Image (cartoon, coloured by chain):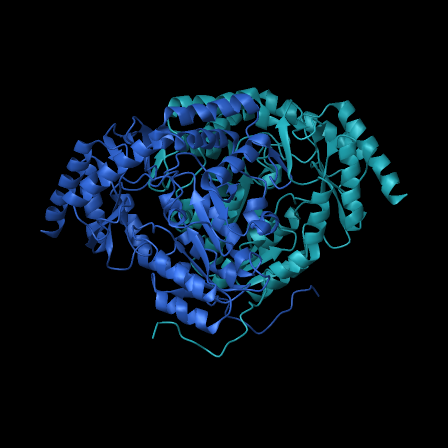
Chain colours: A cyan, B blue
Amino acid sequence: MSAFESTNQTEIAGAHLYRNNARAIEISNENWEKAKENNLTHLKVNFSGRNESYELIETGKEFINICSCSYLGLSSHPAILQGAIDAIKKEKVLHLAMSTLRIRLGMKQRLEDELSSLFNTTVIQVLSASVANAGVLPVLASGHLTDGKPLVMVFDRFSHFSMAYMKPACADETMVLTCPNNDLNYIEDVCKKYPRVAYVTDGVYSMGGIATLPGLLELQEKYGLFLFFDDSHSISIKWKVGEGYIASQLNEINDRMVIIGSLGKGFGANGGIIMLGATKHADILRRYGGPMGWSQDMNVPGMGAALASLEIHKTPELTALQEKLEENIALFDELYPTANAGNGFPIRLATFGHEDDAVAAAKKMFDYGFYTSPVFFPIVARGKAGIRVMLRANLEREEVVRLCDCLKKTEVDIKG
Amino acid sequence: MSAFESTNQTEIAGAHLYRNNARAIEISNENWEKAKENNLTHLKVNFSGRNESYELIETGKEFINICSCSYLGLSSHPAILQGAIDAIKKEKVLHLAMSTLRIRLGMKQRLEDELSSLFNTTVIQVLSASVANAGVLPVLASGHLTDGKPLVMVFDRFSHFSMAYMKPACADETMVLTCPNNDLNYIEDVCKKYPRVAYVTDGVYSMGGIATLPGLLELQEKYGLFLFFDDSHSISIKWKVGEGYIASQLNEINDRMVIIGSLGKGFGANGGIIMLGATKHADILRRYGGPMGWSQDMNVPGMGAALASLEIHKTPELTALQEKLEENIALFDELYPTANAGNGFPIRLATFGHEDDAVAAAKKMFDYGFYTSPVFFPIVARGKAGIRVMLRANLEREEVVRLCDCLKKTEVDIKG
């Protein structure tokens, strides 16, 4: 006899409370297939210039990528590339191949210290923003960023997959709920019923909307609501030091607040950050935050790139890039207004409705020389498929004008 | 009224079927505190030489790190560092800041192609081995690497945290069980009861043991058992092309098998790999494998380093490094025999029993100039605390001799 305790249970399917691969695949895989058939996925390219223009290796076709999260164009900035190179030369090692909880390079410490100083809060720097989400959320759920007692975790329905992915883990620690997008009434009703509640959402949503911060701060004031934001899409792109949308609106990141950020989007380097209000819990997080403590951390060139980007963040060059991005966003909104026009953020969604139309639109745009990505359920709601457009500082005025012209032509072609 | 459906439920704590932060922290946090008080965590260092010798920034103390997973010393190999630098210069971008499912650099494709060719199977290359585990396991659980029907997932109790971390997500898709370490009878009993079963474990365990491969292959033959291995600790360190323990024992990685590997340990670069038997399911995995499809992938220098390491893997230099590692392991086993002596792998655990003794032993070893890491529950069983020693090719013979002498002295000091 082995230790296996056999039961009468024959049906093995899980409860599918928080995820359901079969359903997701049934609904959306055919759209992925169509995108692939139309050569809109699996593109292999050479990077060929300053403005995210690429050459398709197979055919030599040149196009501009309008789906890069490098909003300020910093990921190809010469000083940042040089920072990566210099770091390798200086440290003479690619990474330490062990947990940074035990041993870390001085350069890693300097990076965390400088990020903490720039953003005026305790910053823990990790391999990616999704590693940050995977590490922090279960520790928050069990109450170990607060008083040790579990919190009801309310996930916004639009919170990024990297957060939703952790719902089952959180649900093994505490109660997990999913609320309609930005629904303050829902969140308040949960706060009225339970003494400890955390709300989990994006600062700027990956499809372009933003969190309802003022209302959330009121709920925090009134009920002690814990606020967890992934603000990856807004780091660097605005504000004095590029502190991101949420942090820019606060006097301080208080001890009932965590902000996750990416250093791989606007910031122009790699990796993710945790801006931690509850500094006294940093050790707990480093020890029990799962992937945060495993052996693979951001490599030395990534650190060097981040340190070089930090220097740019202290100069007027940052402001100039932010202004150029702002101009491009405004120009786009003027020429091609979409639902989020005027919100000042770079992500726009041109909605086409049916999934086939979204794929056809993306194909047409690609023929015109712009890569925009078709998005469909579960990325957006069913029947709301569209193409995602992400503006950047390193697009010339005439390129934005041409982009909008092509979107209009495509719209006429598709919608008639 | 909001959409929140209030219930009478006042207790919010989760079922704690697969994880329990409160218990883990209660049991082990004081040990982490002791390790920290004894300056065995949070060490800040400069890398100072070829053999993972470091300088402690605070005091200038020099020591050799015996806890690096860079088993062949490749993470500081000049050709690999140069590969990272050259890649930045060639590509002129740090990364594309978008999902590789949509657009990827030619260099990324070349890396996957060359890894597939070297390891003679379909390889998907991702940000880290833990990202690979997080991405693949739920897709395997729901049956989307097989016939679309869920499999009972049997996790070995010793499987690495990065796998155990995904139990709750898998349990939302299917039945999840945890079996005693290497317990073939248990696994067979599950196979007798259920038609679809996957066993999830390490190839070489992070505390030094190995999987019971021959018995597992018999169960696969007899019942169609799906085998999922994380073989991160054994990539590169032995065998013709460094294919890892599991792959080295097989004629082919069949379509009921997945092997995860790390490129950040023996391989000397960064990132993780998925060796996929069921090639036809690769697209499903790229689309629905969570973090595998999000925007942060391994950066360009990491790719350049990996390509440079691939070149080394085709030369006699690999064999020479492997032989040097083998000599060092044999010498260690001869001079300081431990439970896993003779198994040919580089991880050894010197057991001290009580947690305080393990911390004291690590402190003494550090005073002698060797960083070994104290490990305690939940990394090892309670009351089995010890210090972990990881051998490398880039240790001189006299350093291994001195290491063993110091371990013996420490043992006398602690155990009397």
Q: Of B380 and B107, which appears nearest the observer?
A: B107
Q: Of B242 and B369, which appears nearest the observer?
A: B242
Apparent side of residue B173 relative to residue A412 in the rendered image (left or right): left
Please say if B99 is above or below B337: above
Please say if B219 is above or below A116: below
Seen at 72% across and 54% down, the residue is: A381
- Name the quadrant of the N terminus of chain B: bottom right
Please say if B82 is above or below B396: above
Q: Of B119 and B80, which appears nearest the observer?
A: B119
Q: Where is residue B402 in the image (x, y as percent from the top left)?
A: 15, 36
Please say if A259 is above or below A15: above
Seen at 80% across and 46% down, the residue is: A357
Apparent side of residue A355 relative to residue B217 in the rendered image (left or right): right
Q: Position of residue A260 (x, y in %)?
A: 54, 43
Extreme residue in the right direction: A416
Q: Position of residue B116 (x, y in %)?
A: 50, 40
Q: How many labels does the image show?
A: 0
Apparent side of residue B54 relative to residue B81 in the rendered image (left or right): left
Q: Position of residue B400 (x, y in %)?
A: 19, 36
Seen at 52% across and 24% down, the residue is: B88
Q: In which quarter of the image is residue B345?
A: top left
Q: Can residue A255 be seen in this view?
A: no
Q: Is residue A410 visible?
A: yes
